[in-house]
Amino acid sequence: MDLLEFKQRVLPARQKLYRLAAFLLQNREEAEDVLQDVFLKLWTNKEKLGACNSIEAFAMRVTKNLCLDRLKAKKRKHMVDVAELELELNSEGVSPYKSYELADSINKVQELVSILPEQQRLILHLRDVEGYTFEEMEQITNLTVNNMRVILSRARKSVRDGFLKLENYEAR
């Protein structure tokens, strides 16, 4: 693989790799460092990339592993960063009250996602934020499709139930 092919096949995944790293590490500078490490690792092993079915999925796996290594080394617990998922409100026709209500709901969902187990947060992020298929996620996580479906279902149910509980509690 030469430089041009590397740029065409690997670099388009840059934003997804960065979002995953930022999501896992909760630190933009560390995410950028990991991204540089990922590209360096991929470039030094560029001859082996031709054997990969999906270079993007392989790069996501490398990113995930490097992030988890950093987290283990620091022995710190991370929380999900959904701040990147800003709610874009159309200024026309949205009252300040409705805008505040929607922002409050987003904050509640962010909190509920942050208390999910690590595996559920990861699967939820890959599927619902990044939009990966289960086959791509299988390559990234080394989990079976059925296992991921169960994990995703439990994560969504946990967030939904927690949100409904919060909403019903506050309505009283």
Image: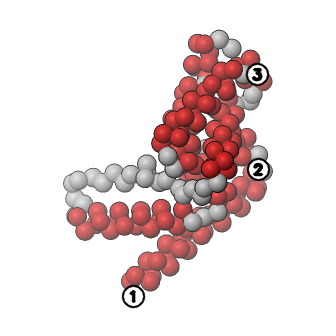
Instruction: Out of 26 and 147, give the one closest to the viewer.
Output: 26
Q: Secondary structure at mark 1?
A: loop
Q: Quadrant of residue 36?
A: top right
Specify few, some or many for label 2: CA neighbours under 10 Å numbering under 14, 14-19, or 20 or more.
some
- How crowded pointer 3 is (Cα within 10 Å; few <14, some 14-19, many 20+) is rated as few
Q: Which residue is mark 2?
A: 143
Identify the residue at horizontal 40%, vertical 67% (top origin): 105
The amino acid at mark 2 is Leu
Discs 2, 3 touching: Cβ within 8 Å: no
Answer above or below: position of 5 versus 120. above
Q: Earlier in the sequence, mark 2 or mark 1?
A: 2
The circle on residue 48 is 3
Count of numbered circles on the image: 3
Q: Write down the residue under mark 1.
A: 172
Image-quadrant location for residue 140 = top right
**Sequence order check, earlier mark of 2 and 3:** 3
Q: Give the side of residue 66 with respect to residue 24, left or right.
A: right
Q: Are marks 1 and 3 in contact (CB under 8 Å)?
A: no
Who's the residue at 62% across and 18% down the image?
A: 6
Decide: few, some or many residues near mark 1? Use Cα within 10 Å; few <14, some 14-19, many ≥20. few
Tell me whether circle 2 and circle 1 mark residues in contact (CB < 8 Å): no
C-alpha distance separating marks 2 and 3? 23 Å
